[in-house]
Amino acid sequence: MCRCRVRVLRSRVGKKTIAETPIGAVIIQKLYGISSELGEIDTIAHKAESGGRPIYNSGTSFFEGTASRERFKSNRLKELILNFSTDMSDRKAADRLNRIRLEEKGIGATTYRNTVEREGESIQKQIELKCEGALSDNGFSNDGKPLEETGFTPNGSAHIEQAAIEHAAIKLNIWEYNAADYELPTETVNVSIDDVCVKRQTETRPGDKATQPKRVDNTVLHVQARNASYILNAASLVGGIKLLIGLLLFNKLMKKQIVIFADGARTIHTAVLNMLSFAKCKIILDWYHMEKKCKEQLSMALKGSKIRNEFLEGGFLACLWYGNINGAIKRLQDIDPKKIKNFEYIIALTDYLERVRAYVPNYALRKELGLRNSSNLGEKSNDLIVANRQKHNGMSWSDAGSVAFATVAAASQNNEIKRWTYSQNISLELRKDAA
């Protein structure tokens, strides 16, 4: 039985036991930390070196490799960490985890935040890779365009039965309509797109001259087909629409009628028209945003709220509700000059209505037929994915951190967290909505 000379070293990273063997190999013992759902656990890992080169390391071969001062985190703990991150601050979430596990110190707020960011970045990368794979498998370029040889052709027109449209139109006293404007819900994919901004974390010192945006942008997309849905998040509008194309291809929905619900932002309209020009796609201006825009502009244009409200309720909003842009503009032009305090806002509102004319449907008839008029599902997704967690007093975010936390929240809404923590995989399949 060979004897080994053993000596003990102390360093900043803890206590190491080194044993020198007759064959020249060096055995190093060190603590391997594990953070689990049950608490903090320390075990021993061994590393064998010969001539300064590693021969075997149980810290990477038997256990999972970690950074020098990082503790391994079990899947169940990661599941709790990600679920808590959607609506709880880092400090509160870390404190709750430590209380559940009866740990006085345990995981700190910074470690907690870093873990969520790292997992969020990995989830987003997985989604991007899957979407890129769907593009490639279906003959699309990496920027989301069908290749010429693919011969991509959307499905033919599918709208609500003519008799049903006619019955609804007669009920509302509407005599002019285009049946093709009223899509068949079972053959339609509804997409709500919205951008949301949060306060940016300052990355330069006060004395630095470098300037940076004050906000961090996230683009949130809510995709719905029949009774199933999925939420996507991206750092940019173009990136979000590319993910949308990949998601639709993956779920074999790209050839259906696509209806985009959005506010009046030019950037969204332009990006949609450019990137989805090959698809059967139309944009519908969200009614709430248009009504809000008109009220704001008229508040600045007219002398007092009473005059404004009388004008709105005197037929102006009714014209817009029935999709009569010409009638609405005519009413703006006919306002008594004595009631106007700033003509510039009247001109601006007229220009706005002209610009969005193509995206304004007959909201009244759509509602009577049971079709959507609003991007409220997108607004709700924004609340769940970004606002509830990131829009609080005193909070500021880095670009990567904001997107990562929003991605984790989206994965939670899509029921992907458990799959991710145990198999490191994202299904990308639309989730059936609750009844």
Image (tube, rainbow, N blue to C red):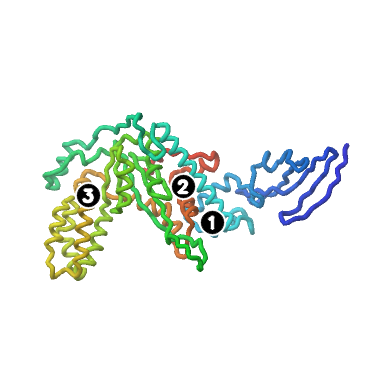
75 or 338, which is in the foreground? 338
Amino acid type for the residue under numbered disc 1: Ala
Would you say 111 lies left or right of 429 here? right
Q: Are marks 1 and 2 in contact (CB under 8 Å)?
A: no
What residue would you read off at disc 2? 412
What residue would you read off at disc 1? 93
Crowding at dot 3, Cα within 10 Å, few <14 / some 14-19 / many 20+, comes out as: many
Circle 2 or circle 3, nearest the eye: 3
Sequence order check, earlier mark of 1 and 3:
1
Residue 166 placed where, x, y %? 15, 40
Residue 368 placed where, x, y %? 20, 46
Crowding at dot 2, Cα within 10 Å, few <14 / some 14-19 / many 20+, comes out as: some
Residue 213 placed where, x, y %? 43, 60
Amino acid type for the residue under numbered disc 3: Val
Numbered badge on residue 360? 3
**In the image, residue 123 above or below residue 391:** above
Amino acid type for the residue under numbered disc 2: Ser
**In the image, residue 417 above or below residue 287:** above
Q: CA distance from mark 1 to mark 2?
A: 16 Å
- Secondary structure, mark 3, is loop
Sequence order check, earlier mark of 2 and 3:
3
